[in-house]
Amino acid sequence: MSTKYVYTFGNGQAEGRADMKNLLGGKGANLAEMNLIGLPVPAGFTITTEVCTIYNQQGKEAVVKLIESDVKAGIAHMEKIMNAKFGSKGEAFPLMVSVRSGARVSMPGMMDTVLNLGLNDDAVKLLAEKSGNPRFAWDSYRRFIQMYGDVVMGVSAAKGEHNPFEVEIDKLKAIKNITNDTDFTIEDLQILVGNFKQVVKDKTGRDFPTCPWEQLWGAICAVFDSWMTERAVLYRQLNQIPEEWGTAVNVQSMVYGNMGNNSATGVAFSRDAATGEDIFNGEYLINAQGEDVVAGIRTPQEITIEGSRRWAKLQSISEEERKTKYPSLEEAMPGAYAELNSVQEKLENHFHDMQDMEFTIQDGKLWMLQTRNGKRTGAAMVKMAVDMLKQGMIDEKTALLRLEPAKLDELLHPVFDKVAQSKAKVLTKGLPASPGAACGRVVFFADEAEEWKNKGEKVILVRLETSPEDLRGMHVSEGILTARGGMTSHAAVVARGMGKCCVSGAGDINVDYHKRQFTVKGTMIKEGDWISLNGSTGEVYLGKVATVAASLDEDFKAIMDLAEKYTRMYVRTNADTPNDAKAARNFGAKGVGLCRTEHMFFEGDRIDAMREMILSDTEEGRRTALAKILPMQRGDFEGILEAMDGLGVTIRLLDPPLHEFTPNEPSSQQEMATKLNISVEEVKQKVDALHEFNPMLGHRGCRLGITYPEITEMQARAIIEAACNLKMKGLNPKPEIMVPLVGEVKELKMQVDIIRKTAELVFSEKGVRVEFMVGTMIEIPRAAITADEIAEVAEFFSFGTNDLTQMTFGYSRDDVGKFLPTYLKKGILKADPFAVLDQVGVGRMVKMGAQLGRKTNPNIKLGICGEHGGEPSSVIFCDAVGMNYISCSPFRVPIARVAAAQAAIMHTEK
Ligand code: ADP
Ligand code: MG
Ligand code: MG
């Protein structure tokens, strides 16, 4: 059987269906479906996405040869249904068509639609005569030349100039002294047609094509060409849409919204896309065509009376003026409105989802031109899912599967007031590193952020980049702005962990620490000036933009309960402080999957004790310093174990290279020298000695505990003592001690011995015992490869996918920004592997680690604690591998919970 390349629809019949989106594109599949359910849709046909692929490989000629007869048959099909003739010079009504692109998912980077195709100097006269409406005929003709000239022939505005067609329109308006397109007379429109043809000739050196068939093939090929344009390629890259998908082409009989005052065109939504409320709404324009409604040429009017009244109120327009100048469709064309209202209900019930529809009313008769599941905000997404579940329109699994987990994020952070934001001046744009809305006064140094905060100021910390030394300053800031660094830079990762707004890598800003100011595109911002950050878009605004708090309502709770019901994995959080742990527990976290102890060494005067330890040459000296740290760490652990009482808390032993803790500034070196009673020279020498060429591959992780066992001993003691203290208070602490960066089982064995010995000592000192576990991170490829050996010693594995990605690829996490953009652009990588788990490579390591681990230790507990734990596609992977839990930063817990439930539903249904 030969392949079918063209699918027709019209008159209540269709060769395609809604579930054929891969082949027919979203628009084509739904045009077919609307026909099948008896809605009024102008007849037409869809050329499949497969033809697009053939076009890209073999070119125009091959495609014309392949589908010419099908296209002819398709046009004949339309002629019959519409009782019109394509390219006719005779007596029948001329058939005009629209040519529309349509990929599987809607793509704003794609080709614009061409309307009124088929018109030429003969057809326009015939159209005028047969319709009895010459104004409409000539209006359609001038629109056609303008659209075809622009979209197919490439006549567009040069940089900095106006669109040449618009220039002609404006010239004529000036001559005729009119302001609206609708005021053009027939003669004016005829003049425009002539001028437009001349514009095409001038700009392209070619005559405007008069043969309808030539016009048609030109438009079809333009749609295919648009698939490979730069903006389409870029859009696909950003949204991870594969090139192989291709676009379909829809050729459809025209219906006319520009036939006079009993005609109109518009867009409508079956529910409110911003709030989710079950309110039919939309906009329309009388005597207009195509995208006039969204183009902003005239003020569109509301569809319902209710919406119209609300709009008028916002615009301070009186009810009298509204009714006469801007009536709703409900008032202006009650018949067509009633039909549209019943269509929207029918479509929503049919697709079981909110519909975004396009329609045209020709001389009082309604025609549907498009329907699709509408885009919506995070809040609307949640509300609609819960409402539709209650209304019995969808079942629980569908309600869950339909959510885009990442969008839940919008609900958790304070948000900018919409109106205030639209009025704000955008200074520059960086990466949307950590969502939220923040405004504060600019400071450049972490310690000053604290000072300002203590004085009651709100601050935004602006840095070239951040380092662990800035942690506390970041913590007290409303938001963080950096000039360098990507989505996995220190600033980005830490900010996400804190649930704090962050814009990173804003390359346009020039930070001058010395003068305490930054400049961006000629604007200078000084210390103390107000700026605002939009962590969801990466935009930086001048001044204070008002925010409103996010509120978690009943609907959100209902969704979380549903997730709980279907999930197989549970969700833990990455938290270093009791506050973070509590916040995460509120979002439904079932324990801590990663508590990083190094952050605790920066608090207050601990850094001094830490530095003292690092700088001392003897075990003796180190033990003295560690003894000072012990009570502080114990206190921290008590806080976190208490916040997560009854739930597991995985505490990772000291991990980063020591030089991150050393004093690097001359002033702090002087301070250390005084405190330790040694010379500055000596301090400097020791700091230099700690320098490493590849710190990420250097003296860090369990290597520290192997060379300095007293560190492990102190940390184990602090953890076990904390647990014992809580147990004596009647609580139920569940510590899980995690050894980082193990690559060889002997490393783990040595650390486990120290930990268990220390624990026994503490138990006998305290006279109580607590249950605890000891396990390791799997983050070095060798650990994944030898996981069977390691599992004989470890009680749990936590896949540290940040380091595992770094070491499997051999990409330094901190330098990846230098080449990653190129890799993405050239298609070597589909996504940043530090944000989206590379399932092919790193994922295989994880899978191998899990399987080998279970082979020698069937009860081993498996989890993941990298940044990937909160990324939906990575969560699905973790469920497939059979992990027991995932762990992510507090504000990602709801996202991970929904993603985990979705994964469970998908995998159990298979
Ligand atoms: P997009 O994908 O950008 O929405 P469409 O192909 O939906 O592009 O076309 C945009 C608009 O053009 C439609 O909303 C509709 O108003 C108008 N249009 C498209 N095809 C026809 C048609 N056959 N008759 C009348 N108007 C049409
Ligand atoms: Mg469009
Ligand atoms: Mg459309």
Image (cartoon, rainbow, N blue to C red):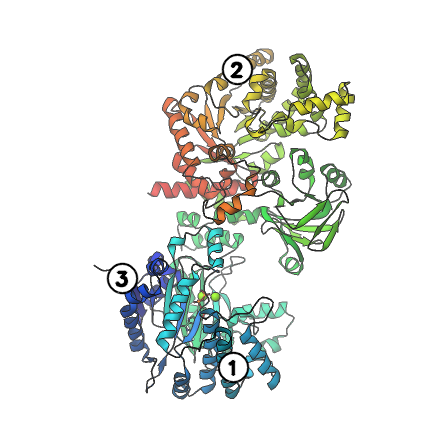
Instruction: Name above or below for residue 248 compared with residue 709.
Output: below
Front in this rendered view, residue 536 or 565: 536
Label 1 residue SS: helix
Task: Point out the residue furthest to the front here.
Answer: 205
Left or right of 702 on screen, residue 465: right
Q: Which amino acid type is shown beneath numbered disc 3?
A: Lys
Q: How far from the left and from the top, in percent, is residue 651?
A: 55, 26
Left or right of 778 on screen, residue 487: right
Front disc: 3 or 2:
3
Q: Earlier in the sequence, mark 3 or mark 1?
A: 3
Q: Which amino acid type is shown beneath numbered disc 1?
A: Asn
Q: Earlier in the sequence, mark 3 or mark 2?
A: 3
**Alpha carbon distance from label 1 to label 2:** 89 Å
Instruction: Name above or below for residue 905 compared with residue 312.
Output: above
Q: How far from the left and from the top, in percent, is residue 580?
A: 60, 35
Task: Check the picture and name the quadrant holding the N terminus.
Answer: bottom left
**Residue under label 1:** 195
Q: Quadrant of ligand 3?
A: bottom left
Q: How far from the left and from the top, in percent, is residue 572?
A: 51, 34
Left or right of 183 on screen, residue 463: right
Mark 2 Cβ and ligand 1 under 8 Å apart: no
Residue 159 visible in image: yes
Label 3 residue SS: loop
Q: How far from the left and from the top, in percent, is residue 212?
A: 37, 77
Determine crowd level at label 1: few under 14, some 14-19, many 20+ residues with C-alpha closer than 10 A.
some
The picture quadrant where one finds residue 595 is: top right
Residue at 65% over, 20% down: 630
Q: Earlier in the sequence, mark 1 or mark 2?
A: 1
**Residue under label 2:** 756
Q: Tell me, yes or no, whether the two marked residues, 3 and 1, touch with CB atoms within 8 Å.
A: no
**Alpha carbon distance from label 3 to label 2:** 70 Å
**Residue under label 3:** 4
